[in-house]
Every structure is written in C-alpha cells, then in structure tokens.
Image (spheres, rainbow, N blue to C red):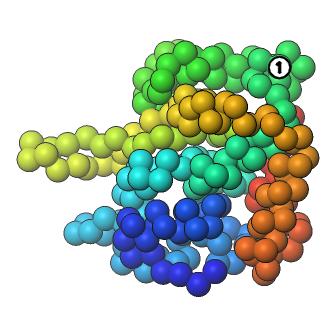
Amino acid sequence: MEFTICSENDLADMVQAYGFLPLLRNQIPGFSVEEHTPPEYWFAEDADGPWEWKGPVIRKTGCAYGKFFAGKAGFISREWYCNFANYRRDGYDFDARYDDGLARFQDKKVYDILAGYPSLLSKEWRRLTGIKKRGEFDPIVSRLQMLGYVVTTDFEYARDKYGNTYGWGLARYATPEAFLGDDFIRHVYERAPAESGARISQYLQTLLPQADDVQLQGLVGGRTRL
C-alpha cells in the first residue's frame, strides 16, 4: 500500500479506494492511516490532521467509522460495510442475539436506547442509559461497534467566542440502519455470514499480500460471544 495522506481529501480517497482502513498502526505493517501520514499532521497546533479529518471524511464519503479492528478504530466504506456487519453479526439482529443468550442485558439496554433515536452524542446516550462512569459505558459501545450494531457518524466540537473549534470532539453515534438507511437494511442479511466473511478475507488477501491468515483473522475476525 503506497500512498501518503496530507489532506482531508487524501484520506477520503484512501477510504474509498481501499474499503478498509484502520486509523492507527496494528499487527499488519503499513495498513493504517498513521503509517501513511507525515508526523507533522498529527495534533499540530496550527494545522488539522487525521484526528480532525475523521468527521469530515465520514460526512463526505458516507463511510462507517468505529472500533472495528480488534477493538481499535478505523474506516470501512459503504460498499463493504454490509458484508462486514453481516459477518460480525453472524446473521443476527440484536433482539435475536439477545434472545439466544449471545448479548448481555446491559448491552441490550444501551443498544435499544440508541435504536430509538436517529443519532445521539456520546454524552446524551450515556445520560439516557443512566450509566454514570465512562469506564463502564465505553466498553459496551466498543462491543456494539465490533459486532456491527453501532457506527460513529460524526464528531462535534465546542467553539470559543470567535467560532473556533477546540477540544477532542464528542462522537455522535447511530445504528447502521439509521445511518446507512434502506440500502443497508435491504442488503445486510442477503448473504450467509460465512460468505460475507469469505468475501472480506479474499479481498484483504489481495489488498494486503504482506499479511498472513492469522494477522488478517486477528484484525477482521472479531465474532465472539460477548
């Protein structure tokens, strides 16, 4: 993967071109935004970089963003997210997953609240759940994203009196059904989960010839009883 990311447009183009793109370095060398972005673009005081570009790239491409890759964040294009969600969900909608004992009661409570809204800021969502500690709430959100039931749709920043943004930004979340709409709803379960998994594996083997099967499975597997 030979590319350099120096702008918001570069990042959007890479997400569209590669389909799967982790934000930070991982077990597959060269497969991350971090490794292809010059260091001066990360957390500079006088310039935006990948951290600030996440929201605009989501809005521009309509991609899914979240903690999809072994619990770490990254982008998946709209074209690939249906297969990804189907594989990770193992063919279950969340009610069926819970009924079969494959999800925790607290996770279902948190999911059901989000599913009742078009989207929610993280602080709004946590307040509605009644969970006071982020250390209890954030792992639930990560599990829901890993399983393909929640995506991050944007990041919203506080502004100073001059209208300039500051701070880390608050994540806005939605279900894929709410964010990606009817096209996702119609197609997410159209294949057997194993077929979706095989399509992803075959594609990534071509995209990442430097990765072995163990590395690929560690990054994009993630189906587990939670």
Image side of residue 164 versus residue 75, left or right: left
- Residue at the (60%, 49%) spot, across then down: 78
Asked whether 176 or 183 is in front, the reply is 183
Quadrant the N terminus occupies: bottom right
Residue 89 in view (yes/no): no
**Name of the residue lying farthest toward the left:** 162
The image quadrant where one finds the C terminus is top right
The percent position of residue 25, horizontal first and vertical second, equals 62, 69
- In percent of the image, x 62 and y 67: which residue is there? 18
Q: Position of residue 213 (x, y in %)?
A: 89, 68
- Which residue appears farthest toward the bottom when viewing the image? 2
Side of 159 relative to 52 (left or right): left
For residue 111, say whether it is visible. Answer: yes
Kindly identify the residue that appears in the image at 30 percent across and 48 percent down. Answer: 167
Horizontal side, residue 13 vs residue 220: left or right: left
Residue 84 location (% of width, % of height): 74, 47
Q: Secondary structure at mark 1?
A: helix
- Front residue of 5/101: it is 5
User: Disc 1 residue type?
Assistant: Ala
Q: Residue at x 64, y 23 (%)?
A: 111
How packed is label 1: few (under 14 Cα within 10 Å), some, or many (20 or more)?
A: few
**Above-or-below relation of 17 to 29:** above
Quarter of the image for residue 177 reads: top right
Residue that mark 1 sits on: 96
